[in-house]
Amino acid sequence: MSQYIGGKRREALTGTSDVVRDPSTGEMVAEISLAGADDVDAAVAAARAAFPAWSGATPGERSAVLHTLAGLLEAEAEDLARTESRQAGKPIRLAREFDVPGTIDNTAFFAGAARTLEGQATAEYSADHTSSIRREPVGVVGSIAPWNYPLQMAAWKVLPAVAAGNTIVLKPSELTPLTTLRFAELATQAGLPDGVFNVLTGTGVDAGAPLLRHRDVDMVSFTGSTKVGRTVLEAAATNAKRVHLELGGKAPFVVFDDADLDAAIQGVVAASLINSGQDCTAATRAIVHRSLHDAFVSGVADLFAAVRLGPTDDPATDLGPVISTAHRDRIGALVDRSRAYAKVVTGGQAPGGALARGSYYAPTLITDAGKTTEVVRDEIFGPVLVVLPFDTDDEAITLANDTPYGLAASAWTRDLYRALRATREIRAGCVWVNDHIPIISEMPHGGMKESGFGKDMSTYSFEDYTVVKHVMFDLTGVAAKPWHRTIFTLPEGQAS
């Protein structure tokens, strides 16, 4: 039973199903039913029915549920990691040490953050009146999460929403729904009322689009490609829904001439290959000072050659497959086209042997590509790194910003002033200095430009999942206020 509606598992009303496959082997992991418009109606109705009570719960009550949920997630961490590894093709080490612990930490954070929601202090900003601010939940949230970090992305969407008093209908990718369904079950076990957190497994066309356009959904949240993000905006416009978007990225990794070269080489290998490069914040464009360029390329090529591709259940495996053979073939076609205008230094092919059963692609390093070429401009979403040289700091900043995206970036330098300039002038939602990728629950994650808007994690996310209401009290106690005379003439003898 693949839908989770009103606190219960159920089959989709469509009667159709699909198979979740392990990208490392192509083998079936599970069969899921596929939701349609009627299932969307049922899930939204459950969320709408649950909203009054949940939005009226105290911050302490919501906090207690999330604290309990964090404990349940921790108790089931190994099972969640194994399921995440199998459905998404993640090396088990990544799932155990990054994905699942990050989700538990995020849950614990929002358990505390739920108690920090408050309005501004009451004050007199106008004669004879007292004003205050209420921060209230938006209502029913319709969310669509991607396949690259199934459990974490579900948590990033669900936790701030429910901590603020909203109810939610979440559609995970039909490729990777299993840990999201378990997350919802554990939330119910933790005490989340039925209907507060609902999960629909289905395609974007049959389940996602009806959810985005549903008249009873007050807000939509989407993580995915910029192309699809534009359609989300169009769908939300049908009844002016609030929108939260976390879209694509083409993160620059800027290495100045005074950088620690060994640290930068190790950093870019980890940051470009994390999750097989299927990460919107992954380092995809290394912009390296010309004096370091050749040594940088040589060092990266050596480490790429040493990366261990292997079975995802082997703790020694560094790099797993990409999500599907179709995605692998798209990456391969793009890299093959680049050979006409750039140099593929290492990689550029799918491995053979035992790994040929899965959708693996070798770590690929490309140089000598022009800054307007496809491999430099487009989001590849795979284990592919492009290296570009620069001569001046001005050129480095210009190259870093020469992208429609603005999600993440990093600057590698030992010079404080260079670091301050880079963090000020690079247009991205996060700019790391001498590191790339780390995220923490207490700080926001989100982009600018065509990488979307709104924040995940941190208390900044509450800005997206709450509305601000102005409340004003008259202090005079009289029926007729002096300002009324500017609107109409009061009858004789009327109190003023």
Image (cartoon, rainbow, N blue to C red):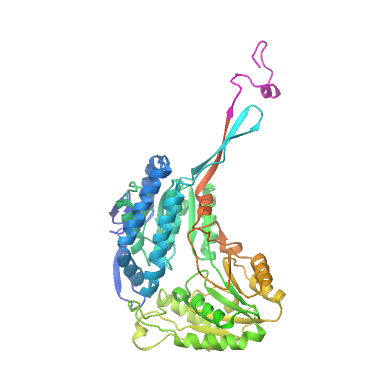
Residue 210 appears anywhere in the view: no
Q: How many marks?
A: 0
To which quarter of the image does residue 371 belong?
bottom right
User: Residue at the location (28% across, 54% down)?
Assistant: 10
The relative height of residue 55 versus residue 411 in the rendered view (above or below) is above
Judged left or right of residue 307, residue 433 is right
Residue 406, image x and y in percent?
Answer: 60, 66
Stretch in magenta:
473-496
> 262 or 46: nearer the eye?
262
Instruction: Left or right? Give the position of 472 relative to 492.
Output: left
Residue 388: x %, y % from top left? 62, 81
- Does residue 465 show up magenta in the picture? no
Q: Is residue 174 above or below residue 271?
A: above
Give the quarter of the figure containing the C terminus: top right
Which x, y percent locates residue 347?
Answer: 49, 87
Quarter of the N terminus within the rendering: bottom left
Q: Is residue 196 left or right of residue 406?
A: left
Magenta stretch, main secondary structure class: loop
Does the rendering let one see residue 389?
yes
| Farthest residue, direction top | 493
Give the x, y percent position of residue 196.
37, 48
Q: Nearer the viewer, residue 184 or 257?
A: 257
Q: Say above or below: 321 vs 198.
A: below
Horizontal side, residue 341 vs residue 301: left or right: right
